[in-house]
Image (spheres, grey):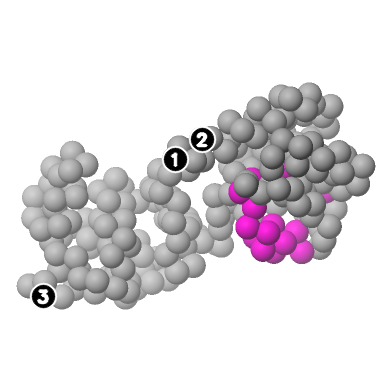
């Protein structure tokens, strides 16, 4: 059963949404502690967030921006505003969808189902964790609380291969095979250059010793 967290300060609307979602077969939780909203959201381990823009403390758009620095939880913004500026800002900060009040309950449920379906089918494919970083292979991004590192396609393929076997030695031949399987045709020298660049970017993220070289064996992601 998918879990949805409702982040809304209108108590009546929260209860109506909770009943609607539970009737539709979802588990629903209402956020009640707006002073620690970010922590409560992550603690809930929800599959999707319904996030209102006008909430106490941080507004919804700022909360969305903070969440996106750490995770790729599907988020639908819900608001009574009709300004296109709010919609553009919400989507640019990483919202998956945007709906205005008063909304049709059926349309809201359809949008929730569509976002969850995209997620299940890989709409946010490749979102993993490496230490304190969120790894989004679809976007080619490593992101932390105050940093975002953009990787090239080759660098991401190399990093994912090492991440999948973290703590194990990965040979150069295996890395080359994975690159060729993804139609990235590079030679041995180019592999060395890509690994060097990847090391540099991980160092920028605060992990200067993330990749260890084992001579005549391969590479190890620590």
Q: Can residue 83 be seen in this view?
A: no
Q: For numbered disc 3, what is the local secondary structure?
A: loop
Q: Which residue corresponds to the image point at 64% horizontal and 52% vertical from the top-left?
A: 46
Residue designated by label 1 = 122
Taking 118 as reference, is 52 left or right? right
- Between residues 165 and 29, which one lies in front from this camera angle? 29
Which is nearer the N-term, disc 3 or disc 1?
1
**Rendered position, 110 above or below 193:** above
The numbered disc on residue 215 is 3
Q: To which quarter of the image does residue 172 belong?
A: bottom left
Identify the residue at image location x=51%, y=35%: 118
Mark 1, Cα crowd under 10 Å, few <14 / some 14-19 / many 20+, is: few
- Disc 3 from disc 2: Cα separation: 42 Å
Query: Is the C-beta separation of discs 2 and 1 under 8 Å?
Result: yes
State yes or no: residue 180 in magenta: no
Q: Can residue 95 be seen in this view?
A: yes
Please rate how many residues cluster around mark 3, counting C-alpha atoms within 10 Å: few if below 14, some from 14 to 19, many from 20: few
Residue 55, how many percent across, how many down? 83, 48
In the rendered view, would you say 179 is above or below 39?
A: above
Q: In this view, does 60 lie to the left or right of 174?
A: right
How far across and down, in percent of the image, does residue 217 sit? 11, 72
Distance between mark 3 and mark 1 Cα atoms: 37 Å
In the rendered structure, which disc, 3 or 2, sits on the residue that comes first in sequence? 2
Q: What stretch is highlighted in magenta?
A: 36-55
The magenta stretch spans residue 52: yes
- Which mark's residue is nearer the viewer, 3 or 2? 2
Secondary element at image label 2: helix
What label sits on residue 118 in the rendered view?
2
Q: In this view, does 154 lie to the left or right of 55?
A: left
Disc number placed over residue 183 in the picture, else none: none
């Amino acid at each position: 059963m998918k879990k949805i967290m409702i982040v809304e300060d209108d108590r009546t609307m929260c209860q109506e949404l909770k009943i609607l979602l539970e009737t539709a077969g979802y588990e629903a939780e209402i956020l009640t502690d707006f002073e620690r909203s970010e922590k409560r959201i992550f603690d809930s381990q929800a599959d999707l967030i319904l996030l209102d823009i006008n909430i106490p403390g941080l507004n919804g758009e700022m909360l969305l921006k903070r969440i996106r620095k750490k995770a790729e939880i599907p988020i639908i913004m819900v608001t009574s505003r009709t300004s296109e500026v709010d919609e553009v800002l919400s989507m640019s900060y990483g919202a998956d969808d945007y709906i205005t009040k008063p909304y049709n309950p059926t349309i809201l449920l359809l949008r929730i189902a569509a976002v969850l379906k995209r997620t299940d089918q890989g709409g946010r494919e490749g979102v993993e964790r490496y230490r304190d970083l969120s790894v989004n292979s679809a976007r080619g991004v490593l992101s932390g609380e105050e940093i975002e590192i953009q990787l090239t396609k080759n660098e991401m393929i190399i990093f994912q291969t090492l991440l999948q076997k973290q703590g194990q030695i990965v040979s150069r031949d295996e890395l080359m095979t994975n690159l060729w399987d993804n139609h990235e045709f590079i030679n041995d020298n180019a592999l060395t250059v890509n690994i060097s660049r990847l090391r540099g970017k991980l160092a920028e993220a605060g992990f200067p010793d993330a990749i260890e070289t084992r001579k005549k064996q391969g590479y190890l992601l620590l």
